[in-house]
Structures are given as structure tokens and as C-alpha cells.
Image (cartoon, coloured by chain):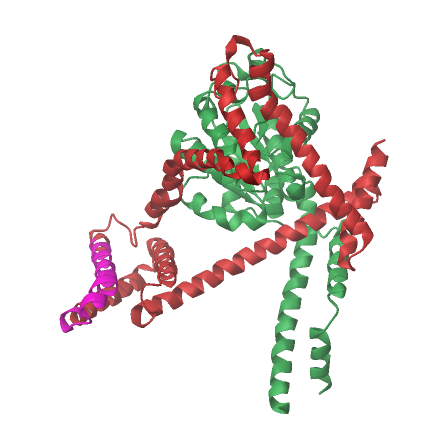
Chain colours: A red, B green
Amino acid sequence: MTLFWTTIGAILTLSIYSFLYKDNPFYKFAEHLVVGVSAGYYLVIYYWNYIDPNVVTPVFLLRVGADRIPLLGMDWWMALIPGILGLLLYMRFFPKVAWVGRWPLGIYVGGYAGLGLSPIMQARVITQLGANALPLAGVEDPFAAMTNLVLGISIFAVMTYLFVAKRSMGAGNKLVRAGVIVLAAVIGYVGYLALSLLSNAGVVSLTNILLVVGLLGTLSYFFFSMKHKGLLGGLARVGIVFLMVGFGASFGYTVMSRISLLIGRVGFLLHDWLHLID
Amino acid sequence: MSGVSGFEKFLKIDRRWIFLAVGVAVVIPFFFPLGLLVDVTPPVQSLYDAVDVLPPSSQPLLLAIDYAPATLPELEPMALAILRHAFSRDVNVAVMTLHPAGYGLAERAGLQVAEEYDRVYGEDYVYLGFQPGTSAVILSLGVNIRNVFPEDAYGTPLSEFPIMDGIRNYDDIPLLITLAGWSAAEAWVYFAHEPFGQEVGAGVTAVMATDYYPYLNTGQLVGLLGGMRGAAEYEGLVGHPDKGVRGMDSQSIIHMLIIALIVVGNIAYFATRKSKKLAG
């Protein structure tokens, strides 16, 4: 019996891969079979793992003790509310009352937004921001700490100049001079870094600087409220380089992922079906 | 001139020849393994270390097998390797899934490795089954596991399993590992790590791996396995080479083939472009 089902699996695998030669009825058959079987499988799994224990059983059969719904531990009658809301979703198939289907959808979207807002904000924004607030040199070194402070202020000054002052007032001489001072501070820092490269702390600094520069460059690339000229244009071009490196890494991983699927199927054919390899 | 003509032919090659070359390159290492070395990278080592320090016969490792058949070749070797690591050290394991198609796959992985190591169901490992509603399920597990899984996958109340004695929520789960071919791994970070401080490790498909490195750098993930290579590295650490290691030979050859095709393709493109400029 195992051989029978393995052979079925092998035939379906070969049918799917036959598409690489050209579209054909075997491929179509396998494709439609996957869609149909998947839909049926999901329906059964969802019904018996979700709808039956959390709606049907507590509401109609009451065979779960103590009037409690297993999931969420609510009173049994409260299952009626999400149950009815779930049914209302299907109103979209009836054009005259399709609008009723928006109510449960709104509740679902609102509920998920409420559940997710805080943890997702924390995970994707606050923690990530914290991870990018990196020491650009060893903080135990007073000189390095001072340099970090100067660099931080410099970056802030440049960003302020770019995003606020330049737009509203134009590039005045004082601001240009301030920019020169900032540039000097940056050059001084780079000189310090070059010296510190002789130590491990210098390497860590370089990595952190790359990360911060990549972050600022990438953010600059996606800042469309000003023309990408001057410093902003330069930062944006730096951002493009980092983006390209990121895309390249993603492409390499994607190749590996897709080839893994082929390897898995070839292993199935040679090992599980034909028993040609151990 | 003949060289340029050759390049033009190359650029117009029927892509099915490339498919054939890829197919041959995948099959050959199955019969003639190259045994190429797979170095262990820090993210994999971190996850291995996190499992390696779990106390034996104590609070269980929660293994969320959140993958479907479509990502089986990449993620199942990870599941088997992690289970082998845990069972070889007598670490208890609770298996569950957030993916409906993972229901049978999670059961299969648990059964296979439990049999290899003579683990007893209910004492050494338990299969909690599937619950839909990803974010709600993950959040509810932080309150009380029995709210979500009052019974195991086969309908037996959790109170009847010694492995679940005193296990209430994430406070009693020293490590959670999710193996996901979709966004479930992110959901575990959002809803288990952030609100509850749960230690989370992840194994993801190679396509997803680059998206998860930021979580690794921040400590939101204790370790990360990326694709078949991640599985192969973990298999090497466990000392039980299996499908991951076997597949890496084919991976390596395919990558060399694709790099060669990219290089030759670019040379051909620029050579033919130059000749077209000269001609016209």
C-alpha cells in the first residue's frame, strides 16, 4: 500500500515537472488536484480543530464540561457571537446584503490591529531602533565617547539643515559654515577610526559605522520630500549600494531555497520511490 | 566573429537546456557524494547552544512545526535534527503547529525521532496538535497553555501527561523554536518574545532568512537556521548527517553552475552589445 501511494506521489511529481518542457494535460491534472485536495484538507482540519470545539460543540452539544470554551476560556454562549459574525462574512455572496459582511471584517481588522499594535511596534520599530543606536567606538574610552557625542550632534545638525532649514530659508552662509564644521568633525572622526583600526575595537567600530551609514543611506533613498541632490543625493546613492547588496543576498538565498525544493523531490524519487540510493 | 556568433547563440539558448543541466547537476551528487564541508555559522551555533543548555527531563522545549509540504525539504531536516539533539540529551519536547498543513508533518517528525531514541509519549514528548488564529494562539499560550490546547492532538487531556505537570505558560517554557515557511516566525517574535520575554529560536526557508537577521542582531531571536544549509549545519553539530547534509552537495554544484551561467551570460551580453554597436 505504501508503494502504491509513493508511486502516486512520484507520478504527480513528474507531472508537475513536465511543465518545464511545456504545458501539458498531465501538469494541468496535477495542478488542479493539488488545489482541490488542499481546499478539502484545510476545510476538514479547520472544522475539526476550530469550528467544532469552539462553536459547534459548546453551543449545540454542550459536551465540553463546565460551560467553558476551551480556546480563550469564555462562557459557552459567547461562542455564538463570533459564530454569527463568521456567518455574516458569507453575506458578500448576496449582493443586496453584501454590506453586512463588512461588519465582521471591520471587527476582525480592528481586533488584530489592537492586538498587534503594541508588540509589533516594539518588535519592529523600537527594538530595531535601539539596535541601531550603536557605539561607534568603545564607550569606555572618554575620547571615543566624546567623539560619539560630536558625531551624533553632527548628524543631527546635517539632518536638520537638510530637512528643515534648507527647505524654509535656503542655504544661508552660517549654515554652510556649520556644515563645514560638521564635515571637519566627521573627517576627524574618520582619522580617529583609522588609528583605532589597529585594535579590535576599531573593527567593531567599522562594522557599526557601516550599519549606521547603511541605515541612514537607505532611509535617505526612501525620503522623497526633497530632490536627491547634494548631500541627500550622495546618501541616497550610498543607500542604493546597500540595497543592492541586500537584494543580492536575498537572490542567493532564493536560489538556494528553490533548488532545495528540487533536491527534496529528487531525493523522494530516488530514495523513497526507486530505492536507488541509501 | 565566430566568438560573437557563439555568444549570440548562447543568449538565445532554449532555457530547457538550462533546466536539464540543473536537473543533472542535482542528481549526480546523490550517486557520487562529494562530501563537501559545511562550516557552522554563528546563528546556527547559537541555536544549538541554546538547546544544549536545556535541563534534561525538566521543562519542555516547545517546538512549533509551522511548515507545510511546500517547504518540507528545507524545514523537515531542521525539525529532525533539533528533535535528535533534544532527545539525545533527554530534553522533553512539546510539539505543536500553527499551520493546518503542518498537522500531519509535525506528528510524523515527532514519531520518527521518538522511535529512534525510544522516547515515551506523554513522558518525554507530547504532540499538542494544531490551532488556527496565529496571534491569538501565541498570546493565549502566554496566559495558559490549556486555554489553547486543553487536550493533546489525540483528545487526551493534558493533565494526564507527566511531561505537562506544572507547565502553565511561557514562564515554564525555557525555549521555543519555530520552524516556519511563512510569517509565523515573526508572529512568535511579536507575540511571545515581546510581551512575555519568551526565548525564541527560528528555522526559516532560505528565501526568508535575510528578513530575520535583524531579529537575530537584536537578540529577539536566540538563533537562526536559514534553509537547507542551516539544517545541514545543525545536522553536523548533532553528529547525525541526514537529508540536509546530503542536499548540500547538490546545492553547491548548482550554485557554481548558476554563477557560471551569470558570468558567461554577462560576457555574452556585453560582447554582443559591442559587436552590434560596431556594426550599426
Left-right relation of A15 to B176: right
Q: How many numbered dots are placed on residues in this image?
A: 0
Residue B167 in sight? no
**Residue visible at 24% across and 63% down?**
A158
Q: Where is residue A229 in the image (x, y as percent from the top left)?
A: 32, 72
**Residue visible at 53% across and 48% down?**
B209
Left-right relation of A30 to A229: right
Quadrant of residue B179 in the image?
A: top right
Membership of A172 in magenta stretch: yes
Membership of A148 in magenta stretch: yes
Name the quarter where the N terminus of chain A is drawn. top right
B27, A50: nearer the viewer: A50
| Depicted A228 relative to depicted B241: above or below | below
**Residue visible at 76% across and 56% down?**
A19
Left-right relation of B48 to B217: right
Name the quarter where the C terminus of chain A is drawn. top right
Residue B205 in sight? yes
Q: Where is residue A147 in the image (x, y as percent from the top left)?
A: 22, 57
Q: Main secondary structure of the magenta part?
A: helix
Magenta range: A146-175
